[in-house]
Image: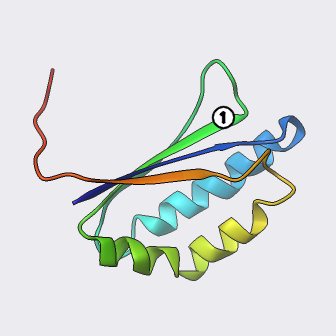
């Protein structure tokens, strides 16, 4: 299983527009093969910061997702909306336990 954490900072005047782009991306991505969860969050202290937390069955499923048109279209629209490139990290997880 892979847990992917992506972070991106919007230009201040584009933050709401970016939120409007990310919501349908998340909804479409939840339908991709191997997607267990796909959620976007907006920072409560800095509304220009966005973070996604995604869970995928396999690296192959994540790679296929990255090639889907809803993903490539959204990533292609980021320039001009964000301050710098997004950071995306994939973490391989072999076990998970509930803490609380």
Residue 30, position as x, y percentages in the image: 40, 64
The answer to whether 90 is drawn above or below residue 28 in the figure is: above
What residue is drawn where x is 13% and y is 42%?
A: 96
With 46 as the anchor, is 79 left or right in this view?
A: right
Query: Where is mark 1, residue-wise?
Result: 49
Q: The C terminus lies in which quarter of the figure? A: top left
The answer to whether 57 is drawn above or below residue 90 in the figure is: below
User: Would you call the spot at circle 1 few (<14 residues within 10 Å), some (14-19), or many (20 or more)?
Assistant: some
Pick the residue in front: 16 or 88.
88
What residue is drawn where x is 46% and y is 67%?
A: 29
Residue 88, position as x, y percentages in the image: 51, 53
With 15 as the anchor, is 39 left or right in this view?
A: left
With 55 as the anchor, is 89 left or right in this view?
A: right
With 66 as the anchor, is 84 left or right in this view?
A: right
The answer to whether 33 is drawn above or below residue 22 in the figure is: below
What residue is drawn where x is 76% and y is 48%?
A: 84
Q: The N terminus lies in which quarter of the figure? A: bottom left
Secondary element at image label 1: strand
Residue 40, position as x, y percentages in the image: 51, 45
Q: Residue 65: name its quadrant.
A: bottom left
Total marks in image? 1
């Amino acid at each position: 299983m892979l847990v992917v954490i992506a972070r991106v900072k919007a230009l201040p005047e584009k933050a709401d527009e970016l939120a409007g782009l990310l919501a349908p991306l998340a909804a479409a991505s939840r339908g991709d093969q191997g997607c267990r969860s796909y959620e976007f969050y907006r920072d409560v202290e800095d509304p220009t910061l966005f973070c996604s937390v995604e869970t995928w069955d396999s690296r192959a499923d994540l790679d296929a997702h990255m090639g889907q048109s809803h993903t490539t279209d959204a990533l292609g629209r980021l320039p001009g909306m964000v301050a710098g490139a997004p950071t995306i990290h994939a973490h391989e997880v072999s076990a998970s336990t509930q803490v609380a």
